[in-house]
Amino acid sequence: MTTIGVVRGDGIGPEIIDSAVRVCDAAAAAVGAAPLRWVEVAAGQVAIDDGGIALPAAAVRALEGCDGALLGPVDHAVYPRYADGRRQNPSGELRRHFDLYANVRPARTVDGVRSMAATADLVIVRENTEGFYSDRNMYRGTGEFSISPEVALSVGVFTRDRVRRVIRFAYALAAQRRGVLTVVHKANVLPQTTGMYPEVAAELAGEFPSVTVDDEHVDAMAALLVRAPQRFDVVVTENLFGDILSDLAAELAGSLGMAGSLNVGDHYAIAQAAHGSAPDIAGLGVANPISEITSAAMLLTWLGERRGEPALGAAAALVQRATAAVLPAVATRDLGGRAGTAEFTAAVIESLDRRAAG
């Protein structure tokens, strides 16, 4: 039996997590896969309210006992700080704990759904453990500090081993897709740090002869994504650049509410919606659950490959097809429709049941 930890998160998190769990259960049943076992884990605001810590040790131990995890959006910007000044952030802490070094963010247009891009089908692979996000580089402290009231500094860390492993991951993904890898950097002004990316990509090219590799400066890449997103297949870059570019790509392809996201390591993976907790609409039943649903499907694909269970991959593929199929006839309001969260979820489940039966 496949065991998946569930952290419901804050704001709209519980609502869209419930949708993802229901859709995955229905898909597993539709393809004849073994039932999924979901383990509820308390983290985020609910854990702060209970014990003052967003990610208690008991929550980490519970997730360690699972095969992977599904994480709802967390509103960590309002969480209290640790004694060393770091803002409590269960998402970042879990990525560090499980060494989830690749954040995989697809952006694909869907027929009938309004988008700024005519067509797009790309994946941005973001290095997830270091780079310009200083809080993930430090053993202790944040890496961001002030030397006077008027001057602040931030430390970014780039290590060749970590750059190598995420680029190798991106090469392998490109080899499974259309065979094109784009490496994004800013080596003209940051040659020793971001310059590692094109250097390492060139070193690894011989391992992946079926993949064509090119590179772009991050500012040019932002312009090219707007101009011609259909040109790109797999994009790999450092942490901060990847965070920004993946949000841009998602909006070009339709909506951040449709953007799936999977944090992947060598031994564990956590699916998490790409967007925030949207506290202004929490509890209203209007949230778009697609990002969490498709993130969960990405997790099922990863688990199926890792565990040698093709039925999980079949369930994931069914979820992806069924979700796209209900659009645009049934859509939440951020996509121009009127469906609420529950109505959209029910439509996806009906769609996948119909597809499985057919």
Image (cartoon, rainbow, N blue to C red):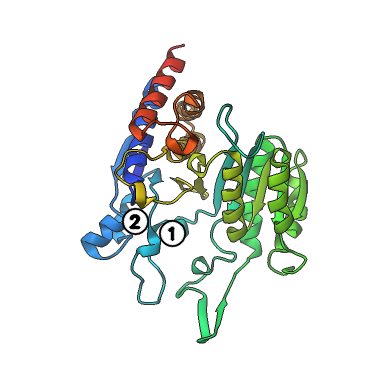
**Lateral position of residue 282 relative to residue 209, left or right:** left
**Lateral position of residue 121 relative to residue 325, left or right:** right
Q: Are marks 1 and 2 in contact (CB under 8 Å)?
A: yes
Report if residue 31 is visible in the image.
Answer: no
* 206 over 196 or under it: above or below: above
Identify the residue at image location x=54%, y=60%: 129
Residue 31, quarter of picture: top left
Q: Nearer the viewer, residue 43 or 323?
A: 323
Amino acid on which disc 1 is placed: His
Identify the residue at image location x=62%, y=52%: 245
Disc 1: which residue: 97
Q: How many marks?
A: 2
Amino acid on which disc 2 is placed: Val
The x, y position of residue 87, in whole percent, is: 40, 68
Disc 2: which residue: 60
The x, y position of residue 357, in whole percent, is: 43, 12
* 269 over 130 or under it: above or below: above
Report if residue 290 is visible in the image.
Answer: yes
N-terminal-most mark, 1 or 2 = 2
Q: Nearer the viewer, residue 39 or 274?
A: 274
- As helix, strand or loop, the secondary structure at mark 1 comes to helix
- As helix, strand or loop, the secondary structure at mark 2 comes to helix
**Lateral position of residue 274 relative to residue 159, left or right:** left
Identify the residue at image location x=40%, y=18%: 353
The x, y position of residue 60, in whole percent, is: 34, 56
Q: Which mark is residue 206?
A: none
